[in-house]
Image: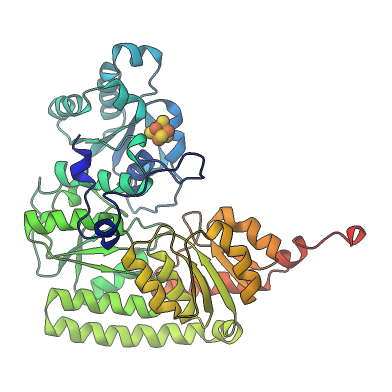
Amino acid sequence: MQLADKSIDQTCAHVASKKPACSRPTPGATTGGCAFEGAQIALFPYADAAHLVHGPLTCLGASWETRETKTSVEGRDFTQMGFTTGMELNDVIFGGEPRLAKAIAYIVEAYAPEAVFVYTTCVSALVGDDVNATCKEAALTHGIPVVPVHAPGFVGSKNLGSRLGAMDVLKNLIGTKEPQFSTPYDINLIGEYNVTGDMWQYTALLEELGIRVLSTLSGDGRVAKIRTAHRAKLNVIVCAKSLNAVCERMEKEYGIPYISVSFYGKRDTSDALLQIAHALGDEALMERTKALVAREEALVEAKLLPFKTKLTGKKAVLNTGGNKSWSIASALQDLGVEVVGTSVRKATEEDKEKARKYLGENGVLMENPGAEQANLIKERGAHLLLAGGRSLYTAIKQRVAFVDVNQEKKVSYGAYNGLVNLAHDVIKAIENPVFDVVGRRAPWEQ
Ligand code: SF4
């Protein structure tokens, strides 16, 4: 499987300084998802491909449809369906390859997908099924790509799984087809999963500038497009440092340079558009982008005015992962909110530097947010907690407003329009009396 090789990320500062791969679960500690979950979450937005989990039924249940990754695929949308081989005791004893081959044949015949992704899990990996050989044979038989994805849960964290899944796409799909035509402004979006339609908040702006999104890994993705990704002029990593290694590899193999941007908040969205234009190296494009940025900033400022009047002076604590630790902080600051602390538990060294830059010397970078966030809310008099669903109870106990900014969110916070959505949700939470009432003692207990 060459897991060791695939897990090397030479571009992350934290990797060079501390450890050879992403963090592994600590026994007894609450952990995030397994590597298989990470791989499936990363590739699931390819809605014209069937995603077949080779393992027991429970593995599928762990990761399926945990995020609202919107798609524009017309006809059969495979993000609405889950496939598993449902391995049982006999498959463990005698091997699960026949069951896998049968499952692929059934899916192709009954659903006619553009491709089948086959995910190994702890069970199929430990049994030692030759998933590569079965997939290769199935691809020849059925005439469509059948991609083995090797990220069984036991190899490590969700982040590592996302990277391994992306590496398997690079190995098996990218470079296997030529685009109908190329332009000097073709880009790939890497690590943008279009959760709640985040990507659609800015792709229209890219199109207006004449920049074509050749393919995505993997938001609103198409199998046919990702196969042509090797012809892009630029890879744009959006909010997913775990995929730096994939871009590094594409730079070596296909000479495609890459940049890392964020599309959360006004300043970062403008910066992302300007960075892309700059990297494509066209003066006229740069001028067009500056004009578009000025227009969009003026438009969004006008929309934000009533929100900012209410939000200026409010203090927030942020507990989210990866580069959202600083990108959402930056979006909140765009709304006039002071961010007094942010979680950097799952952040790289580079993310931590950016978080420090945005929060300033007085901002707290929480390494252990589960234990720190309640005290921080109290000490700094924060009005608001933005985090994942599990932190809701901290907000209730501290009687502060709560906004879910993780994958369970239902509305897009991406780009300029998303910032207006975020402002709307923050105001709704602050003005919602429930957070104050629910944390009080009952009258007869006082
Ligand atoms: S840890 Fe293993 S058994 Fe559990 S969900 Fe992940 S792949 Fe399946």
Instruction: Tell me which image quadrant ligand 1 sits in.
Output: top left
Instruction: Report which quarter residue 383 is drawn in.
Output: bottom right
Observer-nearest residue: 437 or 69? Answer: 437
The answer to whether 30 appears left or right of 381 in the picture is: left
> Where does residue 198 sit, x and y in percent of width and height?
39, 63
Q: Is 110 placed above or below 238 here?
A: above
Number of numbered labels in the structure image: 0
> Where does residue 161 sit, x and y in percent of width and height?
32, 44
Residue farthest toward the front in the current orientation of the protein: 18
- Determine the residue positioned at 35% across, 72% down: 353
> Where does residue 417 sit, x and y in percent of width and height?
43, 73
Residue 45 seen from this side: no
Q: Is 118 placed above or below 374 here?
A: above
- Determine the residue positioned at 11% across, 55% down: 230
> Where does residue 162 sit, x and y in percent of width and height?
31, 47
The answer to whether 329 appears left or right of 216 in the picture is: right
Observer-nearest residue: 114 or 340? Answer: 340
Instruction: Report which quarter residue 18 is drawn in.
Output: bottom left
Residue farthest toward the right in the current orientation of the protein: 444
